[in-house]
């Protein structure tokens, strides 16, 4: 078509924010293409009306046959022989605004009916969406206009951002493109990576240029991962309760928690009084528990007094530390008040039986295997560097540990920035930091769904981060499962395709920038196409995300990597199995281990559960986001495994799975296991209590 020629004419409904136009059939623009109308407007700060170009985007387009309806009989339609191109084409355009002195404004007037509608050329669009060169992040091209580059304004990231998309719609891809651009700008980026997907960046970073080779750090969240350095948390800095929770001890296992708490107190004091910091670590704590168990066993044969126990305990400690039991050091330790309190706690928890002591050792040993929890914490400067992206690999860790490590690192980074800005003493970091949080729904779920430590610090960063130069990019496929207080603070959003209506609602509720009409377009987006709103863009924009240069493991199927991941998932699945067996033993009253987990679950659910189904369910737990809630009154567990919705009536064996129907499927078992692992099934059902009472009384009668 000729440049400058109108492609349509405003006809019918016309308003300041949207207008309908009839399209010249000789050139029909595609959906989402850009047009403009000329309008007399009074821009802010001006006295007189000016002629401005109001840019609009085509949001719907349809062809109608006037006088011709699909109800006409086929022989009639067939013989009409209408030439193509004689149909009426009606388009609806959404007004984006007009640019006046480097700013974008919404017009206050509706385009008059009869106004010409022109195709917006590339230069007009480039100017409309332009971002200053040193501030721009190139993320792709306009949808329907692959010749116009689309940019984000890095300054807009100060007010945080969310990347939201259904699985497979391209959210990690988008985040990789952003990371590339941030690297080029010299930003400090910290990626929280629960699946280890970003680790592949390291191997491909040379493609950006040789100067980038040393600008990726892989921070290991587990000592047996591949990576550059191991993250380290000091056990001394953890509270006794925190340690027990991270170790995976259920909140109701009060005696095991008491053992761990007492042993930690004793170990910490020993380290302090004897000047041997290593004694305060997990190994030290385990050894203290060992001494406590031995002391109880020996003291039991003599008396059950605390004094006798203390004598035995000191003797055991002396043996462990290589100190004579009459040594000055041991006397000094024995006289310490905090130490005595720890000893007393151990005695109270173990004097009846030592089983909780052995359980506590098992929990501590499991935690030791991770290798992160030691006596020294890592320094911020070891893992954050200017112009460098740090990938915190959290793959293969239990949810409690992931949550704690993310909480810990975010607190460290945030406090380092607060100290720097306020000139306070202590560890500082001199540059702003951008946090990329994958799977944000894992770490910051609504309070009503799950309590996490990360939510506390994420809430602080979302509201105060801007002042201190800590900026959050949260990525999720389940915005309805992210705390609304945090989500609403993420003022920019990149929204790719989302299909779940609940998630669409959550996106709309979170930020008013995303208008209803943009939301309605989301299901129609292709993979890699996104709507961007908020301070990162001059006006809402639809982009096709550009090709990325860097790799991530979600894209190319590298077999060895796949196997590594499956290996890690298997490892995690095994940990879950052990934990579930332990907890099921308590709930059902029996001794279950990983070999008869099927019996335990059959008993709990009330329908035969087979081992292969359990194994599959454990892998779902290890790989996907599974949540559960429990209606105590009716004994109903509801939840989701990934995107599959599940409802199970315990003991009645009634199952409803949105994918598999009513049979015992891995989704249902995964959700029930989640409920078990999260200690939701603490109270037995009323019938259970009666059963217990009945059995107990009959047993007494038989006696
Ligand atoms: Zn299912």
Image: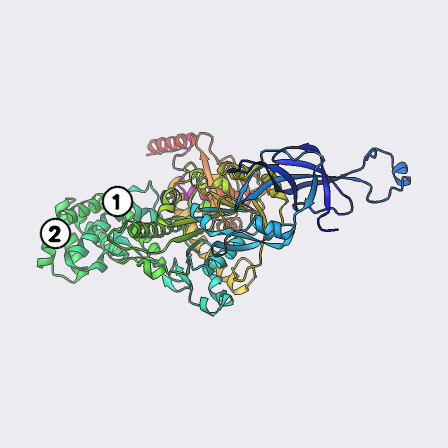
Category of crowding for the residue at label 2, using alpha-carbon neighbours closer than 10 angstroms: few (below 14), some (14–19), many (at least 20): some
SS at mark 2 in the image:
helix
Q: Is residue 655 covered in magenta?
A: no
| Separation of marks 2 and 1 at Cα, in angstroms | 20 Å
Write the start and end of the magenta stretch as one range: 676-685
Query: Depth check: 281 or 472 in front?
Result: 472
Against 62, residue 190 (above or below) is below
Query: Depth check: 474 or 265 in front?
Result: 474
In the picture provided, is 537 more to the left or to the right than 124?
A: left
Q: Report x, y in % for residue 219.
A: 39, 60
Q: Report x, y in % for residue 267.
A: 21, 53
**Residue at the image point whose x is 40% and y is 30% from the top:** 690
Query: In what quadrant of the picture does the C terminus appear?
Result: top left
Cβ of mark 1 under 8 Å from ligand 1: the answer is no
Q: Which mark is residue 500?
A: none
Q: Is residue 678 covered in magenta?
A: yes
**Earlier along the polypeptide chain: callout 2 or callout 1?**
1
Residue 21: quarter of image: top right
Q: Report x, y in % for residue 132.
A: 50, 53
Query: Depth check: 271 or 548 in front?
Result: 548
**Residue at the image point whose x is 13% and y is 61% from the top:** 323
In the picture provided, is 487 more to the left or to the right than 423?
A: right
The secondary structure that most of the magenta stretch takes on is loop
Q: Report x, y in % for residue 141.
A: 59, 53
Reading the image, the residue beneath label 1 is 258
One can see residue 137 in this view: yes
**Residue at the image point whose x is 19% and y is 47% from the top:** 342
Query: Depth check: 45 or 160 in front?
Result: 45
Category of crowding for the residue at label 1, using alpha-carbon neighbours closer than 10 angstroms: few (below 14), some (14–19), many (at least 20): many
Reading the image, the residue beneath label 2 is 334
SS at mark 1 in the image:
helix
């Amino acid at each position: 078509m000729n440049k400058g020629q109108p492609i349509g004419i405003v006809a019918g409904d016309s308003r300041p924010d949207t207008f309908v136009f009839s399209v010249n059939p000789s050139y029909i623009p595609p959906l989402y293409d850009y047009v403009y109308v000329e309008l007399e407007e009074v821009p802010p700060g001006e006295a007189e009306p000016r002629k401005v170009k109001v840019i609009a985007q085509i949001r719907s387009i349809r062809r109608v046959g006037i006088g011709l309806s699909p109800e006409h009989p086929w022989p009639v339609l067939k013989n009409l022989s209408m030439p193509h191109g004689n149909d009426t084409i009606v388009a609806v355009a959404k007004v984006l605004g007009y640019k006046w002195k480097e700013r974008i404004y919404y017009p206050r007037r509706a385009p008059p009916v009869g106004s010409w509608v022109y195709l917006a050329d590339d230069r007009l669009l480039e100017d409309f969406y332009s971002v200053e060169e040193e501030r721009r992040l190139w993320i792709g091209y306009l949808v329907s206009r692959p010749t116009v580059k689309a940019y984000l304004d890095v300054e807009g990231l100060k007010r945080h951002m969310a990347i939201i998309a259904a699985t497979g719609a391209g959210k990690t891809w988008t985040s990789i493109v952003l990371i590339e651009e941030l690297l080029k700008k010299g930003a400090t980026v910290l990626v929280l990576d629960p699946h280890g997907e970003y680790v592949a960046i390291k191997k491909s970073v040379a493609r950006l240029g040789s100067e980038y080779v040393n600008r990726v750090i892989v921070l290991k969240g587990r000592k047996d991962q591949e990576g550059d350095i191991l993250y380290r948390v000091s056990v001394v800095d953890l509270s006794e309760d925190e340690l027990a929770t991270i170790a995976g001890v259920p909140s109701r296992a009060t005696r095991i928690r008491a053992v761990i708490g007492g042993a930690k107190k004793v170990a910490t004091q020993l380290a302090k009084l004897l000047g041997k910091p290593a004694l305060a670590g997990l190994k030290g704590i385990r050894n203290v528990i060992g001494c406590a168990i031995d002391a109880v066993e020996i003291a039991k044969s003599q008396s059950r007094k605390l004094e006798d126990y203390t004598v035995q305990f000191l003797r055991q400690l002396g043996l462990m530390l290589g100190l004579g039991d009459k040594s000055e050091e041991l006397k000094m330790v024995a006289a310490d008040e905090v130490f005595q309190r720890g000893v007393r706690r151990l005695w109270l928890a173990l004097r009846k039986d030592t089983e909780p002591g052995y359980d506590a050792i098992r929990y501590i040993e499991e935690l030791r295997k991770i290798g992160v929890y030691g006596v020294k914490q890592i320094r911020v400067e070891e893992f954050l560097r200017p112009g460098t992206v740090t990938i915190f690999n959290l793959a293969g860790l239990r949810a409690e540990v992931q949550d704690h490590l993310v909480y810990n690192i975010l607190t460290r980074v945030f406090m380092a920035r607060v100290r720097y800005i306020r000139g306070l003493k202590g560890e500082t970091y001199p540059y702003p930091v951008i946090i990329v949080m994958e799977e944000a729904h894992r770490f910051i779920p609504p309070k009503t769904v799950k309590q996490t430590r990360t939510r506390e610090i994420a809430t602080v960063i979302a509201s105060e981060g801007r002042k201190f130069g800590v900026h959050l990019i949260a990525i999720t496929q389940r915005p309805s499962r992210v705390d609304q207080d945090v989500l609403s603070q993420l003022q920019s959003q990149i929204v790719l395709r989302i299909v779940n209506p609940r998630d669409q609602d959550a996106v709309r509720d979170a930020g008013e920038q995303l208008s209803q009409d943009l939301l309605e377009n989301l299901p129609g987006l292709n993979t890699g196409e996104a709507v961007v709103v908020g301070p990162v863009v001059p006006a809402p924009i639809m982009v096709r995300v550009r090709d990325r240069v860097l790799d991530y493991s979600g894209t190319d199927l590298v077999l060895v990597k796949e196997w590594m991941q499956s290996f890690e998932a298997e490892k995690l699945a095994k940990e879950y199995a052990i934990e579930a067996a332990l907890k099921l033993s308590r709930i059902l009253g029996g001794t279950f281990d990983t070999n008869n987990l099927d019996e335990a679950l059959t008993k709990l659910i009330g329908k035969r559960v087979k081992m292969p189904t359990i194994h599959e369910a454990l892998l779902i737990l290890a790989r996907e986001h599974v949540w559960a809630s429990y209606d105590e009154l009716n004994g109903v567990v509801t939840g989701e495994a990934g995107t599959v919705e599940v409802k199970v009536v315990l003991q009645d064996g009634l199952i409803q799975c949105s994918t598999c129907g009513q049979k015992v499927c891995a989704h249902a078992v995964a959700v029930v296991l989640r409920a078990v692992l999260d200690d939701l099934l603490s109270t037995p059902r009323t019938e259970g209590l009666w059963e217990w009472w009945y059995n107990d009384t009959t047993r007494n009668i038989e006696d």
